[in-house]
Image: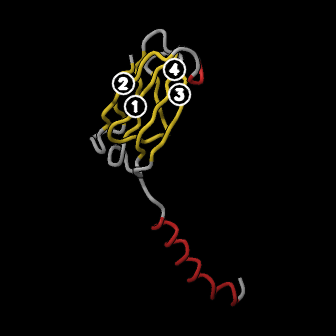
Amino acid sequence: MNAHHLRLLPTLGLLTAFVVLATPVVFAGSSGQQITVYTGSATRSVKIGGDNQFGAETHQTLETPSSPTYDSGYWWERTIQITSYSGTGGSGSDLGTVDCNVPVSQSGNWYDCFAY
């Protein structure tokens, strides 16, 4: 390393600290929950809509080949709507919509929603 590189080290350290501190962090159970969706035997997919951990309205289609289905990677909170469909990808007959009241925080990070 030459002298020029050594002078840049403190600047790189500050930039790294800024990026780490500026990145939002979600701790398990503290800012929305991942959900476990329980469905009836006729349901092949569900559409989910509601607020994510940042309060932004979010929509997702989830395949439900068996019950329960774990919706990992999405963090829901408050009241979400789950509509069941007889076909894959949100196609086929609309089998009904239910509300699931997902807590903003709890001791774990999975919450059960029943979309029969």
Question: How far is the residue under mark 4 from the one under mark 3?
Answer: 6 Å
Q: How many marks?
A: 4
At 48% from the left edge and 9% from the top edge, which residue is drawn?
42
Reading the image, the residue beneath label 3 is: 62
Reading the image, the residue beneath label 1 is: 81
- Looking at the picture, does residue 94 appear above or below residue 102? above
Q: Secondary structure at mark 1?
A: strand
Which one is in front, 103 or 4?
Answer: 103
Q: Is residue 109 left or right of residue 88?
A: left
* Kind of residue at disc 3: Leu
Q: Earlier in the sequence, mark 1 or mark 2?
A: 1
* Kind of residue at disc 2: Val
Q: Which mark is residue 98?
A: 2
Measuring from the top left, give residue 79's x and y in whole percent. Answer: 33, 37
Question: Mark 3 Cα within 10 Å, few/some/many (few <14, many 20+)?
Answer: many
Of circles 2 and 4, the one toward us is: 2
